[in-house]
Amino acid sequence: MTSPFTMTIGGTAVDGNAFFPVVNPANGAVVADAPNCSPQQLDAAVATARNALPAWSARPVAERQKVLIAMADAVDANTEVLAGLITAEQGKPIDVARTEVFGLGYWLRETAALELPETVNQDDTERLSITRRVPLGVVAAITPWNYPLGQASFKVGPAMLAGNTVVLKPSPAAPLANLKLGEILRDVVPAGVLNVISGDDSLGAQVTAHPGFDKISFTGSTRTGKLVMAAAAQSLSRITLELGGNDPAIVLPDVDIEETAEKLFWAAFSNSGQICLAAKRIYIHADIYDELAGKLTTYARSVEVGDPTEEGVQLGPVSNRRQYDTVVGLLEDCERNGYSFLTGGLPDASSGFFIQPTLVDNPPEDSRIVQEEQFGPVLPLLRYDDLDDAIARANASQYGLGASVWSADPDVGFAVAQRIQSGTVWVNEIMHLSPLVGFGGLKQSGIGTESGLAGLLEFTESQTLTVKRSA
Ligand code: NAD
């Protein structure tokens, strides 16, 4: 068997010896077979990344910056092919996929402009003492399927700018855009500096068990994050963990209901709810609950769900069978327990993993749909009378990734935001990310930061150099 998709190891195309199918979630067809990286090929990827390290880390930062910008240019020039692959393997509407590709180029360019700090501790006749940041070595970048290239953008640019070399391992549910990215960048990045491998469910654990990595930058579920942390203990490789969330939104009674309904819909349902920082449960003040729930319902019914390759379609299917089964399981639990759906509900059996946007009407706080991360197009609306109670319920979670507060008075919103235990809290917007601003999770939503200077520093270590100048 052969595949049009190859891995990139040491700057060259590497065929699989075995393959696994990548399924289009909109119709169940196989998009392509992807190479299943063998243990020997993983060894080769780590070895070539190790060999490339001395020359890459010795390059002046200005030269590494130029490589990142050339990568961004190459990504931009291939927007259509990359976006087409994202839509085919992950299911987001084609226009949103184009935005994701644009985001990768943008993140690479903006990351290239970041400066690694250097502190002069002492510089006099007695002593020169400087603390600088040095690269960690070979980085494993392990990503989920919800934003195949977006997730890579948070890792690849900062790791390379800091002087590390990288082995990128995308999710088996959506590896094709990443494999194509590796191919596109073969002539742009020095051989061995960026390697892209793909494999079935077992490859992630093989990567984290491999002794050749100095750093594991992982994005995925909290459950897998714990396995990554345990595996990293063997070699004490550094870790960054960007994990799951169950992000609360708190809506105060003073909001403009019509306007807020539309914003809240997209806060929760963009990418069919498959965003770590999407609103996962919405606390609405009792005074406006019925009206806002009604407007949300009307808006949800107006959204076009369908074939994501068609221009104008706003939401595609759930991205893969496993996630579809998880979301259907939560819907069945709602039905079993008699919670009512304002719109949506259990899907009809069809050829793709489509689930209509579903609103659950005020289920109990201890229900699964409130307590678990749904990561799909199902949203519980929750009524509250007392703001302190809403904040307490928002904070009563193992997770602490993102949150949002909605109020006509930004100062009041800001005061509420300060009481929420999440890595990022937005007021009157959500999911606004910037390559210059770090994000990360509190509690079991993660360890460490991505993006911005803090995200760049995660790919470095502090080193102090001291020169004694006089006796
Ligand atoms: P997942 O944890 O199942 O998989 C993530 C990645 O880890 C994949 O590449 C997978 O192949 C790999 N993997 C699987 N088992 C592994 C193991 N034992 N060791 C090492 N790697 C292993 O997550 P998913 O289903 O792909 O993604 C959805 C989850 O990701 C959700 O929980 C979501 O909240 C989270 N997520 C978090 C962020 C964030 O920034 N915090 C962003 C996006 C998604």
Image (cartoon, rainbow, N blue to C red):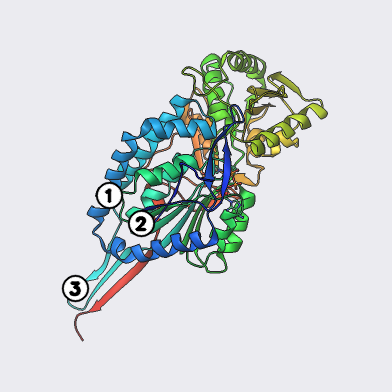
| Residue 8 placement, left or right of 350 | left
Along the viewing direction, whichever of 256 and 154 lies nearer the viewer: 154
Residue type indicated by callout 2: Val
Measure how far apart labels 1 and 3 are at the Cα level.
37 Å
Secondary element type, mark 3: loop
Q: Measuring 21% from the left and 86% from the top, which residue is drawn there?
A: 471
Find disc 3 in the rendering and name its residue.
124
* Res. 453 in view: no
| Residue 292 placement, left or right of 309 | right
Find disc 2 in the rendering and name its residue.
193
Crowd around label 3: few <14 · some 14–19 · many ≥20 (10 Å): few
Q: Which of pointers 3 and 2 lies earlier in the amino acid sequence?
A: 3
Residue type indicated by callout 3: Asp
Residue 143 against residue 270 in the figure, above or below = below
Find disc 1 in the rendering and name its residue.
67
Q: Which of pointers 1 and 3 lies earlier in the amino acid sequence?
A: 1
* Res. 76 in view: yes
Residue 375 against residue 18 in the figure, above or below = above
User: Residue 183 appears in which quarter of the rendering?
Assistant: top left
Measure how far apart labels 3 and 2 are at the Cα level.
39 Å
Rendering coords of residue 105 (x, y %):
34, 38
Residue 213 against residue 30 in the figure, above or below = below
Along the viewing direction, whichever of 155 and 282 lies nearer the viewer: 155
Residue found at the far left of this picture: 125
Secondary element type, mark 2: loop
